[in-house]
Amino acid sequence: MSSTKYSRVASYELEDGRNTSDYNEESYRSANSSISRWRPRSLLTGPRWLRDKSSQHKKAFRLGLVLFVVLVLSALIVLPNAPDLPALPTFNEGEFDACPRLLGEAESGAQGLGGPSDSKQSTGDQSEWAEVMMPSQLIELVEHGKPLPRLLIHQSWKTRDLPSRFQKWSNDWRRIHGKRWTYVLWTDEDNRQLVEKFYPEYLETYNNLPREIFRADMIRNIYMHKFGGVYGDLDLIPLGPIDKHITQFLAHDEDAKPIAFVGHMGEDNFEHSIPNAFFAATKPGHPFFYKPLDYVVKHQNEPAFNREPEKLTGPVALRACVKEWQASEGKTHELRVLENGKIYPLNWSGAPKLNWCLCRTHSPWFNEGKCNALYEKTAWTITYWTHSWS
């Protein structure tokens, strides 16, 4: 065996100072037993496994690199189809860079920024808040033919354990509307029970939806049709009582037909211009709410619709259903599209940059109190657009 094989270890020396290049093959083998006592003399040429293409270390490194690439590619393929992935925040890197300057200019301006420094946890006498009713109690009233509460607030979450921010905002709904209203928090389990009991013709469609966010979108139409009242996403906050603006909630005309309400945002040709974060129906039974349900049945198996919720169960689908209703059946039961700025004042494309700084939860300068002060004189609600899909 040629001793040149061992000449590559010349960058190391033994602890007694003797260089390994002074060793022949036999002395190298003898010294090899003490290799753990060697220390680097020069790293300019790198370790042996990087310099020797034929070494086993090099081969192992290459194999490991290949396996790593395979794992990464596999993850990229699998992740888009994984269930219940949260949506990515819809902001760009550097989007909030101008906020310190804008906030400074606003604070030093003639009027400054109104509102408190932040909105604290709701306090006060909770006996004056809207009463909480369990979904099972509401379902039982229907099953026994008993009268329903006239003024209902519906919200939904995976379980009854709300994240702290959502808990605070749900308390705001109860506090602002007071004890004349009844508050219901629906869970995924409650939602399925509701479909099973009263809308079994849609149960297969409901169960076959690809992710829970699709089902959460679909079920809110059933809340409105079966019970009436108001539905609001957990990041949609009332700036005052809804019945202050939709006075039909206060009417007691048993013969009046139900009226449905949706919000509007931005230009009418914007496909997301009718978000589904808010619904209202003055009474149960408005036939419009079958439209979004039937829309899901019709398009559920079409790839152009079912990849993301917006086009099958979300705002794009809702806008299509509203346009169809207005064109064909709007004269039988009224569906009102509320004017811009009432429900969704924080327009995705048209809001001033300063408002974006204060009102987006993804902003480092998010401030609920100051955000609300920007809109409370003109808007009925404000949505912070957390995009917390689950």
Image: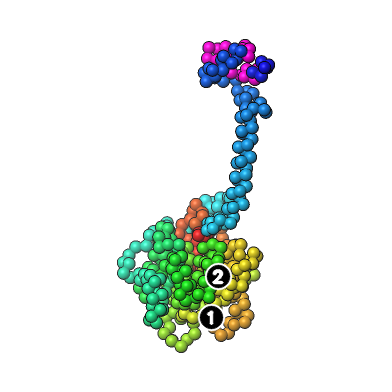
Find residue 179 and report its image quarter.
Answer: bottom left
> Could you tell me the amino acid type at mark 2?
Thr
Left or right of 387? Residue 77 is: right
Pick whichever, 368 or 111, lies toward us: 368
Q: Which residue is mark 2?
A: 205
C-alpha gap between disc 1 and disc 2: 19 Å
Residue at 64 percent across and 23 percent down: it is 45
For residue 124, which numbered disc appears in the image? Answer: none
Q: Which residue is mark 1?
A: 287
Residue 162 in percent (x, y) is at 42, 60
Residue at 52 percent across and 14 percent down: it is 15
Residue at 54 percent across and 62 percent down: it is 211
Left or right of 314? Residue 283 is: left
Pick whichever, 348 or 219, lies toward us: 219
> Could you tell me the amino acid type at mark 1?
Pro
Q: Secondary structure at mark 2?
A: helix
Q: Which residues are magenta?
A: 7-25
Q: Is residue 23 magenta?
A: yes
**The N terminus sits in image quarter:** top right
Residue 17 in percent (x, y) is at 55, 12
Number of numbered discs: 2
Find residue 250 and report its image quarter.
Answer: bottom left
Mark 1 and 2 residues: CB-CB less than 8 Å, in contact?
no
Q: Taking the image as drawn, is residue 224 in sight? A: no
> Compared to 179, does 58 lie above or below?
above
Q: Is residue 243 magenta?
A: no
Residue 81 in percent (x, y) is at 58, 56
Pick whichever, 127 or 192, lies toward us: 192
The mark lying in front, picked from 1 and 2, is 2
